[in-house]
Amino acid sequence: MSATLEQYARVAGEDVVDQLRQLSERLRGLRVVHVNSTRVGGGVAEILAKLIPLQSELGIEASWEVIDGNGGFYAATKAFHNALQGSRDEIPNEAFIAYERTNVENADKLRERLAAADMVFIHDPQPAPLLDLIPERKGKWIWRCHIDVSNPERHLWKYLRDKLLNYDASIFSLAAFAQPLPHPEYLIPPSIDPLSEKNVDLPEADVDAVRNQFGLDPGRPLMVQVSRFDRFKDPVGVIRAYRLAREFAPDLQLVLAGGGATDDPEGDKVLDEVRSAAAGDPDVHVLELPPDAHRTINALQRAADIAIQKSTREGFGLTVAEAMWKGKPVIGGDTGGIRLQVVNYHTGFLVSTPEGAALRIRYLLHHRDKLLEMGAKAKSFVCDHFLLTRHLREYLTVMAALHFDVQDRIELG
Amino acid sequence: MDNNTNPTGESAAFAVKDCALAAIATGERAQNLKELRDRLQTIDAAALYYHFWGTRLRPSFDDPEYNNDIAGWVRHGLHEPSLAERLSVVDPMDYPDLEALRFELVEIVEDYLDRLPVIPWSHEDRQFHFIRSQIVVFDTHHVVTDPNDIVDAVSAMSAGSVFYHFIDARRRTPDQMDDFRTWLIDLDRTGYNPLCDRLAAIDPYFPTLTELRDQLVAVLAGFFGEGSS
């Protein structure tokens, strides 16, 4: 067994890694290409950075391509992202032109590799038009949707749907996100990597160092939300919940830590709004962290008493699983993939308003035994269901099902 | 009982398997009770299987409040507790096949609809989504050749193994039998009849997979003796 697979076997279990080997034996030598729009920042890039080497270790010729785009393209895809998640803001015609032009340019650049691949995973809407632009393709193409498209703006969905019709399969994180398409639609929640810098165990000294760096008092309770500065993550709502909770927990501290992503031009605007909402309160720490600040985020999550992820829309919410992996109960927005991870009274609480969040903050801070019990359950739940090994197993399953044209059963061993 | 050869004199081995389900959206959904009735009439039977049996392999903490996804949604999505109760006691083992199960479900919903002045609706983000699944079967590299070893083997089984050998088996075998009985009969056509009768009496539907494993161990240990290996 390779060194990395051995490490995963130690965390997830020998049997889990053995199942990966059984599946990949059937897929050995396949050329698999993943395509997305950013190499750093955001959950998709983080998952791909680990999935690709693991697929390679299992004997699959896996590679990762990133499409190039300019500011106009990223502004367009950000508008698409918002519209697919329900925003009704009008999208100018220029955005569609930039989107299509960028995909034509990238199709020319990637044509040879994508046409020759046995399996192509296209992640999210940004590179979705590539399939129709490469008619000489020989392999199976899969559209992997990481975002919540349960209630998309209909005109934009119709436009995007036309570009998805010829895919061989698609993958959604939740059943609620799956829109009618004329091919199998697999349901695969994403995952966290327990061996990554963001999730690996840290010495207590590292956690203390990060507390010192940001002026956090280790003797007072701390609540942390880690996510992009994005309206759907409701960072201003988190500040409101914190203010309500301070009524009965006056020593509470709040950290809002946001990593940037190169394909999110709206982040600065939301960050300004958050800073404005937090102004004058020394116990609200708004941290703009670089995309590679994984160890800092890890330490902040470990320093927290409670993790919060008060999203109003969420594809999955990897930061929820990350915090749970560190043994923290999570107060999460009752939406999307957070519902898969936060089980009321077991791994945390689902809430719909800042008031609801404040109520649960109070409960957890006043019931320390419950806080610890839920944290322990949360860690175990993630170990069983949301680690990278489960995610990889399901990707390999989709590949095997498509490659061998399987309908109901894949028998291995 | 130490017979580990079948009537042809060949050793019959029980290869322990594990399994996982790959969930696939059907694209069909329901937001109110009429839509549920309509979808139940036409949905792929594989979706009925998933919502009655596949739920066993999904992440959960508690014993399920309702034993199938449809009853759970009627309670928590439509807020119709009395219909949820009627749907939750439907045991798929009572029906010869999924089509008969489908007929019963539609009947129950129809009957309830007939008495309602207003059709109950769910919130937009609480719709019921019909799902089907593919099963992936893994080798555990664990083979039992001596029936006396089966107690220990079952004790160590994962939930996936219990599902595969005691639930999925009924879809694979022509006489809809679990793998344990198939193996025992193959070893000795009549010698294990009392044990097979006791295995057949275990209801695979209402217990959780962990409870099922415990029941299997109890029955097998009662026959072969605890830690018989």
Image (cartoon, grey):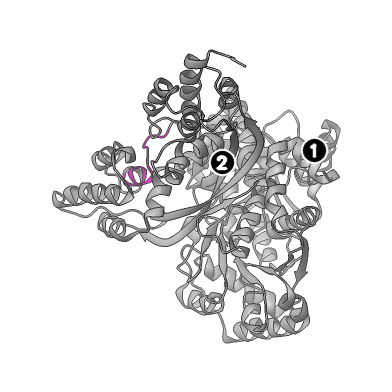
Residue A138, located in which quarter of the rendered image? Answer: bottom right
Contact check, label 2 and label 1, Cβ < 8 Å: no
Residue type at mark 2 is Ile
Residue type at mark 1 is Arg
- Tally the numbered discs: 2
Residue A373, located in which quarter of the rendered image? Answer: top right
**Quadrant showing the C terminus of chain B:** top right
> Is residue B14 left or right of A1 when viewed as pictured?
left
Q: Nearer the viewer, residue B22 or A154?
A: B22
Q: Nearer the viewer, residue A246 or B216?
A: B216
Q: Chain of mark 1?
A: A
Residue B175 makes an appearance in the image: yes
Residue A277 screen position, x and y as percent: 62, 53
The answer to whether A253 is drawn above or below residue A112 in the figure is: above
Residue in the image at 59% along x and 14% along y: B227
Q: Secondary structure at mark 1?
A: helix
Q: Nearer the viewer, mark 2 or mark 1?
A: 2
Q: Mark 2 sits on what residue?
A: A331
The region drawn magenta spans B64-74
Q: Mark 1 sits on what residue?
A: A211
Residue in the image at 68% along x and 86% along y: A101
Question: How many residues crowd mark 2 within 10 Å: few (<14), some (14–19), many (20+)?
Answer: many
Q: Nearer the viewer, residue A138 or A348?
A: A138
Residue A267 screen position, x and y as percent: 68, 64
Residue B146 screen position, x and y as percent: 60, 24
